[in-house]
Image: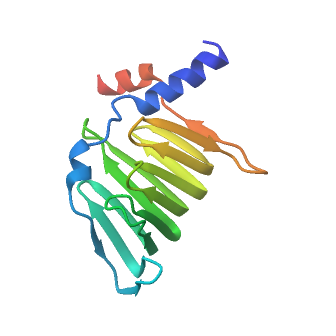
Amino acid sequence: MNKIKWIAFALLTFSASSQALESDYSQKIVVNADQQKVDIKDNRVTFFSHVIVTQGSIKLEADRVTVYGTGEKGSEVMIAEGKPAQFQQKMDSGQLMKGHANHVRYELKSRIVTLTGKAQLQQQDSLVKGDTIRYNIKTQEMVADGGKKGHVTTIFEPQQLQQTKKQ
């Protein structure tokens, strides 16, 4: 199989049955943290220490999470910081999409998750690493960038090996 076919196969393997649970977006958002600071003037809430954000099967864990309001309900933007900050969501197949990075940006309205700084995104046996990974949950499109001095690494297990393991 030539290189282009392998790359296409890797992307298809990564995205196969990766439709997110639609019911997540109708669930309330719950934030647990050791401390919070509200800035009413700037429409911003910052949560500190052991922060866990949940919305249905979506889970965001970080040392610090800042939620920026835009005035439009459901269009908030969450910026999580940690060493690393972690994001996960259950797909309709029951599999988990997991990611982590130094910074995780989650845009609720557009359903875009951007992982920056030692970024990693994993689904089943497929793994993508880079400086920045941008994943559009709604359209199931992912773009990874290695940064100025880096590169993107994709690791996947070919389907033949997965089938052998099942037998």
Colour setting: rainbow
Residue at (47%, 79%) from the top-left corner?
42
* Residue placed most toward the observer, 114 or 71: 71
To which quarter of the image does residue 47 belong? bottom left
Q: Position of residue 40 (x, y in %)?
A: 40, 84
* Residue placed most toward the observer, 112 or 4: 112
Q: Residue furthest top?
A: 1
Q: Is residue 131 left or right of residue 112?
A: right
Q: Is residue 76 above or below residue 43?
A: above
Q: Is residue 107 above or below residue 52?
A: above
Q: Is residue 120 left or right of residue 125?
A: right
Quarter of the picture holding the N terminus: top right
Q: Residue furthest right?
A: 149
Residue at (60%, 42%) from the top-left corner?
144
Q: Position of residue 157 (x, y in %)?
A: 48, 30
Quarter of the picture holding the C terminus: top left
To which quarter of the image does residue 138 belong? top left
